[in-house]
């Protein structure tokens, strides 16, 4: 910092206190620029690390990888949800779109749970059919929510 006046040129009349203030201004400005450029770039890079899931791939390895990645990221839940949605396609994306219609602010946890209910461990056809036949609308449950629950059972 003491050599700052030398950097300004040999004919500069800037005192060392002015040079120090100028260096502080430069440091602050550089820090602000880095926050605006580097951090969003790092966050968008992390989205690329998520594997694509459309519903035809094996679900369990994808879920394990995605859950681990989302827990590591130090970004807001809305950013995590955006990245998760960007990593989905086909029927998996349709599940989340339907969920977002019901609750636009749905959490990442709820998104992953919906995907797990849809693509998770497979029951036998007899078990699924029995659950479907025995399903009843719960007290206070909206008809649309009940139909979506039946849809998942199908």
Image (cartoon, rainbow, N blue to C red):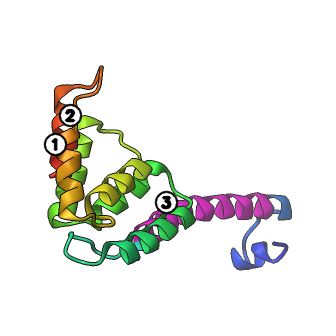
The quarter of the displayed image where residue 105 is located: top left
> Residue at 49% across / 60% down in the picture?
36
> Residue at 34% across / 59% down in the picture?
116
Between discs 3 and 2, the one toward the N terminus: 3
Left or right: where 112 falls relative to 142: right
Quick check: 118 above or below 46?
above
Query: Percent from the top left, x then y, of residue 47?
Result: 39, 69
Look at the image and tell me whether residue 50 can be seen: no
Q: Which residues are magenta?
A: 18-44
Query: Percent from the top left, x then y, of residue 48?
Result: 36, 75
Q: Which residue is mark 3?
A: 36
Q: Nearer the viewer, mark 3 or mark 2?
A: 2
Query: Percent from the top left, x then y, of residue 79?
Result: 42, 54
Other residues around mark 3 within 10 Å, as few (<14) / some (14–19) / many (≥20): few
Q: Which residue is mark 2?
A: 146
Q: Is residue 154 magenta?
A: no
Query: Percent from the top left, x then y, of residue 57?
Result: 25, 78
Mark 3 to mark 2 CA distance (whole Å):
45 Å
Between discs 2 and 1, the one toward the N terminus: 1
Determine whether label 3 and label 2 are within 8 Å by CB. Answer: no
Q: Which mark is residue 133?
A: 1
């Amino acid at each position: 910092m003491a050599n700052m006046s030398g950097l300004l040129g040999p004919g500069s009349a800037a005192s060392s206190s002015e040079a120090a203030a100028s260096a502080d201004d430069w440091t602050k400005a550089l820090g602000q620029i880095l926050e605006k450029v580097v951090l969003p770039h790092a966050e968008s890079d992390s989205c690329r690390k998520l594997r694509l899931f459309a519903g035809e791939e094996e679900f369990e390895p994808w879920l394990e990888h995605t859950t681990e990645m989302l827990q590591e990221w130090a970004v807001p839940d809305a950013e995590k949800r955006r990245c998760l949605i960007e990593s989905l396609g086909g029927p998996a994306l349709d599940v989340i779109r339907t969920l977002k219609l019901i609750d636009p602010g749905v959490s990442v946890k709820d998104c992953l749970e919906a995907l797990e209910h849809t693509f998770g461990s497979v029951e036998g056809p007899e078990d699924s059919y029995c659950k479907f036949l025995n399903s009843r609308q719960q007290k206070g449950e909206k008809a649309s929510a009940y139909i979506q629950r039946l849809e998942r059972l199908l």
